[in-house]
Image (tube, helix red, strand yellow):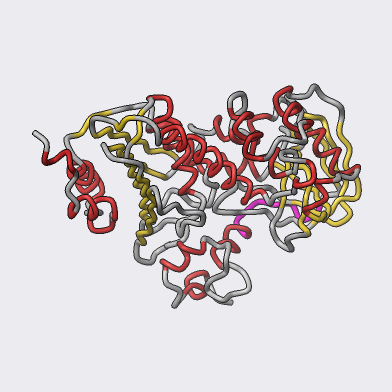
Amino acid sequence: MKGLEGEIEGIPAALCVRCKGAKLLCGKASCPIVTKLYLSSLIPGHIEGVAGNSPPSVFVGHNGYPRVRVGPSIPSDRGDTAIYDNPQEWANFSVEEIARLRFSLFRGYKVLRVDEASNPGRYLLDLHDMTVSSRPVPAEIEYAKFEGSVDYSPETQPFGPGGYLKRFTHSSSSSDPHIEKVYYDTDLNAKEGIVSLYKEENVYTIQKALSIGMIGKARFRRIVPTRWAITAVDKMLSDHFLSIVSRCEEVDSYLYFHSRRIGNEYYVLIFPDAYWFEMIEVWNNGSIWTLDRQPVIESDYEKMGRMISTPKIGGSFFAARLPVLEYLARKGRKGGILVVRFIDGDYTMPLGVWQVRENVRDALKKENNLESMEQFFSIIDVRRSLNLKGYSKTYLFRKNQKRITEFVS
């Protein structure tokens, strides 16, 4: 049997970074890197069912779309389980601690058509009732067929083992009034509902509500695969903040931010300009998708008039975009934005784009001033021994493009 090195021999690391195990661009039937992660997980071979308090948590798969697996996630824990599904509380956890937490959530699912959200049946209504809860919900699942495989994704936090449901029950709980209001407003479109919820709820609660088909005009409501719902919410919310920021005055200095947590390091620059957003990702030797192959640098950018809907680097683009635009909206300013992400060898499994969002938020708590964009790249060069100026479309564009303010004394 081939080892992992043999399985990936001849596959360029850049292809793995672009694919992240989701698109099977190498032509194999399954991703050998993800398979290795599956095999290294301590997953029980067979169980009949699980009883515990759901955080609440729900899972919607994407395979087979528009017929997808939909169901609850439940740990075998009767205590306060909210932390199992709240990435805002994971900042000081290691990769292994987060994985252990998430793999303790057991999934149960049935296959539903995505358009059932416009006219939900009993099972989907039960999931809605659980999702709208303001605190963990006592629940129980019994399996018709336990499959055992866990779920990894470049967008979502990992999900524990699952299987097809024979029975799902849950107890009643008090409802979150903000979610309940949007849920019963069947004339409110999805973007309006998401923006209104964000004034009171965190992004993770909104992602769950959208995914399980609880937001939008009644006849247009759809069940949305979890990984797609995450990026959709990030994009809609950051588009909302961009509409506010675009009418503001430019920042008047170069603002620099930095954070390193969970095997990822972030450098952020906001500079005087109209809106421009660029994200550069450096997957170092030893990181998840490169393994022992050469490091890979990926980037994408957008500006007014060239807006991206499907960036090459995936959902991390919009996960980083949201907190920076939210920050600028609070300041009442606009500017160009550069985010540089380094992924190192201690990031040993994909945890989802929540860590991009939370790490950038952490960086934005510590504002510093620089003299220029040149200084920003010099800091990175000194710390990481890597000159990224030639990889940045923002830097190259500004280097060759004079601004009118440069001619005004």
Q: How many marks?
A: 0
Residue 291 appears anywhere in the view: yes
Classify residue 143 as left or right of residue 223.
Answer: right
Q: Is residue 18 above or below residue 259?
A: below
Q: Is residue 100 above or below residue 154?
A: above
Tell me the residue at 39%/31% (across/down). 328
Q: Pick out the residue farthest to the left.
A: 409
Classify residue 156 as left or right of residue 113.
Answer: left
Q: Position of residue 258 (x, y in %)?
A: 33, 36
Which quadrant of the structure image shows residue 375? top left
Residue 53 appears anywhere in the view: no
Q: Is residue 254 above or below residue 147?
A: above
Classify residue 319 as left or right of residue 367.
Answer: right
Classified by dominant secondary structure, the portion drawn in magenta counts as loop
Between residue 70 and residue 190, name the one nearer to us. Answer: 190
Tell me the residue at 83%/34% (across/down). 139
Classify residue 127 as left or right of residue 16.
Answer: right
Between residue 67 and residue 237, name the one nearer to us. Answer: 237
Find out whether residue 44 is within the magenta segment: yes
Give the residues in magenta: 39-46
Between residue 170 and residue 369, name the one nearer to us. Answer: 369
Q: Position of residue 333 (x, y in %)?
A: 35, 29
Find out whether residue 259 is within the magenta segment: no
Q: Position of residue 383 (x, y in %)?
A: 23, 44
Tell me the residue at 72%/46% (across/down). 59
Q: Position of residue 67 (x, y in %)?
A: 78, 59
Quadrant location, the C terminus: top left
Quadrant location, the N terminus: bottom right
Which quadrant of the structure image shows residue 183? top right
Between residue 320 and residue 150, name the one nearer to us. Answer: 320
